[in-house]
Image: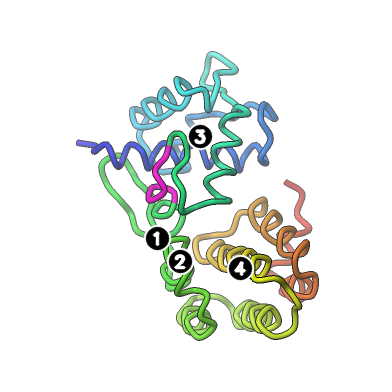
Amino acid sequence: MTTIEERKKNRWLMLQKFYELAKGRSDYEIIDMWKVGEQLGWDRETTETTYDYLQGEGLLKAMTLGGGAAITHDGVKEVEKAEEHPQEPTLHFPAFIVNITDSSETVHGDRIEVRGDAVGAALGRGAQAEARDINVYRESLGRSAFDAELKRVLIEAREALEEGEELSADDKNDALDDLNKLAQEFGKGPSATRVQRLWNRIKEIAPTVAAILASAVSISKLLHRDG
């Protein structure tokens, strides 16, 4: 039997997936909710009940009779607020749901599957304080399955942020959070949309760090991918 906590996790995962597929734009395109459910590893009942809740709350809306739907403006705001302030609850989701599902867990019906690697565990949103320690950052990357070039570039970017950029404390913390999230993306299978968004935010704060990141082939490919 699916618990209330698992249902909340499922709702967040579906809303986040719609956001990514819609490239962060409300009413941008019609998305097949059944395919979203398949991508998340759910049966049709889990997909339908999860969608029904999100539609009822005005976060998704039906576009076709066959399961086509779109994320609404309120849905976009919900995702972006959660991602910008992961330690704070949103109108529909408690903070721990966003932190857990984004770092290492996917819920399949009444079953939780742990995914990711050492980077997801060490650099996830629930561990940002520890991740600010550059030694923790290096160690977590060392335990990851990343290729050698990506590890090197991520460490160089972090060192440049620590040593070379003249930033305010707030700007440095924001850039650190985005760099940690970028590493986390590669720990769970990167979304080009999210990588592009995180890199752009880093570039606004610390252009030198962004340039170092873009030198990695795996990052550069995603930055130049359309959609």
Up-down: is 198 above or below 179?
above
Magenta stretch: includes residue 94: yes
Image location (x, y in percent) of residue 84: 58, 51
Dots 1, 2 in contact, CB < 8 A = yes
Q: Amino acid at mark 2?
A: Gly
Q: Secondary structure at mark 4?
A: helix
Q: In this figure, which residue is indicated by the disc labeled 4?
A: 173
In this view, the residue farthest toward the left is 1
Seen from the viewer's position, the closer of residues 65 and 153 is 153
Q: How is the image coloured?
A: rainbow
The magenta span reads 93-98
Q: Could you tell which of marks 4 and 2 lies nearer the N-terminus?
A: 2
> In the rendered image, which residue does mark 2 sit on?
120
Residue 47, x across and y down, in percent: 40, 31
Q: Which mark is residue 35?
A: 3
Q: Position of residue 144 (x, y in %)?
A: 48, 77
How crowded pointer 2 is (Cα within 10 Å; few <14, some 14-19, many 20+) is rated as: many
Mark 1 surroundings: few (<14), some (14-19) or many (≥20) residues within 10 A: some
Which is the main secondary structure of the residues drawn in magenta? Answer: helix
Helix, strand or loop status at disc 1: loop
Residue depicted at 45% across the width and 20% down the height: 56
Q: Which residue is mark 1?
A: 115
* Amino acid on which disc 1 is placed: Arg
The CA span between labels 1 and 2 is 8 Å
Relative to 35, is 174 on the left or the right?
right
Label whose residue precedes the other's in the sequence (1 or 2): 1
The image shows residue 52 at horizontal and vertical percentages of 42, 22
Residue 114 highlighted magenta (yes or no) = no
